[in-house]
Image (cartoon, grey):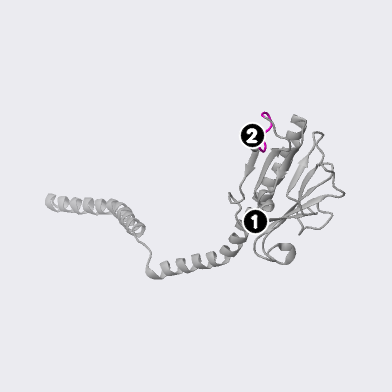
Amino acid sequence: MLDRSQERRLRLIVCMSVMATMKLPFARIRLLRETGRRSLQRGFNLIELMVGIAIMALVLYFMIPSMAAWMQSSQIRSATESLQGALQLARAEAVRRNTSVEVVLTSVAGGGDGTDWLIRCVTSSPTCPGNGQAETSIQQRVGAEGSPNAKLTINPTMTALAYSGNGRLTPVPAASIAIDVAHRRANSCLVDGGDYRCLRIVVAPGGQVRMCDPAVVAPNPRAC
């Protein structure tokens, strides 16, 4: 038999053991939290940083050429779509005003090959902008705005295309007129083995305007 002092001592030892056992999980949780906080605060070392820079350099090395080709092709498309819209607007204005309206290729008229153009009435009046009037054009565009590297070639050679009041070309050509929009660098089109997607506008004698891709073959609807 234990006396009272021994019994109290035994109870105290048991209680301390139970409390220590209960505190152990909380101590582990606290340790894990502190370890996780330290791992979150850990940064990149020099080797990891150099590997990341090398990967980014490789990605840029392969992306830059294709990105440059895409940007130049976008300039060609911008100039082509702009000229196509100008021809369609001139035809609509000719029908609306019941008079001849022309698209003047201003750079070509000056001996250049830029994609500049303006729309005006062939016979100007106070209500129809043109030469000799306060408003000399219905609408115009400078090729340097968005497509400085695009150039224009028209076949047969001419400096303006005019529409009559019935929406047809005047004078009526014997065949369709082809306007090629390409890059200023020689042999840079896909059809010539280059990297840029050059385009063509075909204007039918009846006045219809169509954009096509010389690098695409029939029966693709984008073919010329």
Q: Amino acid at mark 2?
A: Gln
Give the foreground label among 1 and 2.
2
- Label 1 sits on residue: 150
Q: Are marks 1 and 2 in contact (CB under 8 Å)?
A: no
Which sits in the foreground, 188 or 159?
A: 159
Please rate how many residues cluster around mark 2, counting C-alpha atoms within 10 Å: few if below 14, some from 14 to 19, many from 20. Answer: few
Q: Position of residue 136 (x, y in %)?
A: 64, 37
Q: Position of residue 214 (x, y in %)?
A: 77, 57
Q: Is residue 81 above or below residue 180?
A: above
> Which residues are drawn in magenta?
126-133
Majority SS type along the magenta span? loop
Residue, far front: 132
- How far apart, in angstroms, are the residues tagged by discs 1 and 2? 31 Å
Residue, far right: 174
Q: Residue at x 36, y 57 (%)?
A: 40
Is 31 situated left or right of 97 in this image? left
Quadrant for residue 35, please give it: bottom left
Residue, far top: 127
Q: Is residue 126 above or below residue 216?
A: above
- Label 2 sits on residue: 133
Q: Position of residue 100 (x, y in %)?
A: 77, 36
What secondary structure is marked by label 2? loop
Q: Earlier in the sequence, mark 1 or mark 2?
A: 2
Which sits in the foreground, 158 or 28?
A: 158
Quadrant for residue 190, please give it: bottom right
Q: Quadrant of the C terminus?
A: bottom right
What secondary structure is marked by label 1? strand
